[in-house]
Amino acid sequence: MSQKPLPENLHIDTLAVRAAVDRSQYGENSEALYLTSGFVQPDAQTAARRFSGEEEGYTYGRVGNPTVSSFEMRLAALEGAQACIATSTGMSAILLMCLGLLKSGDHVICSHSVFGATIKLIGSEFAKFGVQTSFVSQTDVAQWQAAMQPNTRLLFAETPTNPLTQVCDIRALADVAHAGNALLVVDNCFSTPILQRPLMLGADLVVHSGTKYLDGQGRVMAGALCGSDQLINEVLAPVMRSAGMTLSPFNAWVVLKGLETLGIRMKAQSQQCLDLAQWLEAQKQVARVYYPGLSSHPQHALAMAQQSGLGGAVLSFSMKADSPEQGRERAFQFMNATRTVSLSTNLGDVKTLVAHPASTSHGRLAEEQRQLAGIEQSLIRVAVGLEHLDDLKADFVRGFDAL
């Protein structure tokens, strides 16, 4: 069904509701969910042209689906990207990136402080295929510069990091990458395009775990890569067609609906997180709070400039302890005493989630890797949801009282 084209220069909150593929002949207002593995072709000649790529059109679910296309179109619009390709999970998006961009003999520079599974995938799994990785400080641009080699293909960072919320200078790292003919890839999971648009700061690709804030209610898994037409459609899409880490139409539809409230949720949860972080700083059992919205955060000014003046909805704090063993014990005592929040390693939910990174998200790393990433046994990560702040504070008091 033909429909009026959207005006140019719409606000990001409007794009989060309106950007999608054309309606079907039925004129549905809410985007349709197309549950089919294949698509009927009008004739053999059209089928041949579509399968060869000469003509646009849907052929097979592993290659494309209208519901998935709607999600891709909407997320690309939010990120200010020319194109987007959706994947089954956030980690499969990083896998697709590696398969599409790297070969034996290539070199990657990656922050010490990224998600544990990312460290394992890039640093260990791709090492089997001859890809070298140098891990550097998230915040020291000089270390990134010093690690550059003639065979450096890409620089990878997430900002803020999981779980210590360290912030890298995206524009500075883009300059380092491009001076060496490399690409900068930024994981934008924590901020989402509502708070931060890395492509506008010089990044070449943006990675998303749609499982987190893009969905917003912990229902499904999804991932995506956003960037230029050349990188997405010419480099990565052919790999996707062969490898098949495809996003299911149902999951795409769920996350598509989640995007419609992304702006409201991110702003509300970020404010809740700031209020809780300020309160935690005053608690005598807390050694340190990690949150970019706090003036005490080492990269506070940079974060406020890059993240539209908001710190996001994830904080971490470390318990006061005399040893790692006592730190772990106190963290577990605190978490086990809570009643309102959920103990879960996910984030981005409207429910507040509490996790112990050293034994969960970063539990598979060697102790040396955890130390380099700053993951202490006393560290607790909090992904702040939309419960009333007074109830969250009361639950945390319950946790502190158990110590």
Image (cartoon, grey):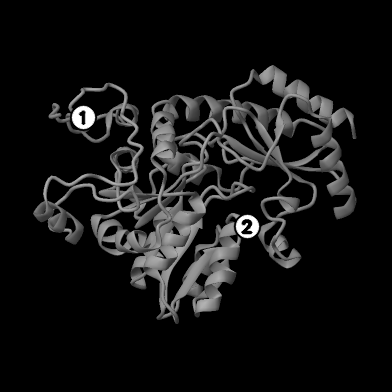
Left or right, 152 with reference to 237: right
Q: What's the residue at 24%, 36% (across, down)?
A: 21
Q: Which residue occupies the foreground of this view, 310 or 231?
A: 231
The quarter in which the N terminus is drawn is: top left
Task: Identify the amino acid type marked 2.
Answer: Gly
**x, y percent for residue 67:** 32, 37
**x, y percent for residue 352:** 65, 30
**x, y percent for residue 332:** 83, 41
Cβ atoms under marks 2 and 1 closer than 8 Å: no
- Quick check: 298 above or below 1? below
Q: Earlier in the sequence, mark 2 or mark 1?
A: 1
How many numbered badges does the structure rendering display? Answer: 2
How many neighbours does mark 1 have within 10 angstroms: few (below 14), some (14-19), or many (20 or more)?
A: some
How many neighbours does mark 2 have within 10 angstroms: few (below 14), some (14-19), or many (20 or more)?
A: many
Q: Which mark is residue 24?
A: 1
Picture quarter containing residue 44? bottom left
Q: Which mark is residue 116?
A: 2
Q: Secondary structure at mark 1?
A: loop
Q: Which residue occupies the foreground of this view, 246 or 394?
A: 246
Task: Identify the amino acid type marked 1.
Answer: Ser
Q: Which residue occupies the foreground of this view, 311 or 301?
A: 311
**x, y percent for residue 59:** 24, 50
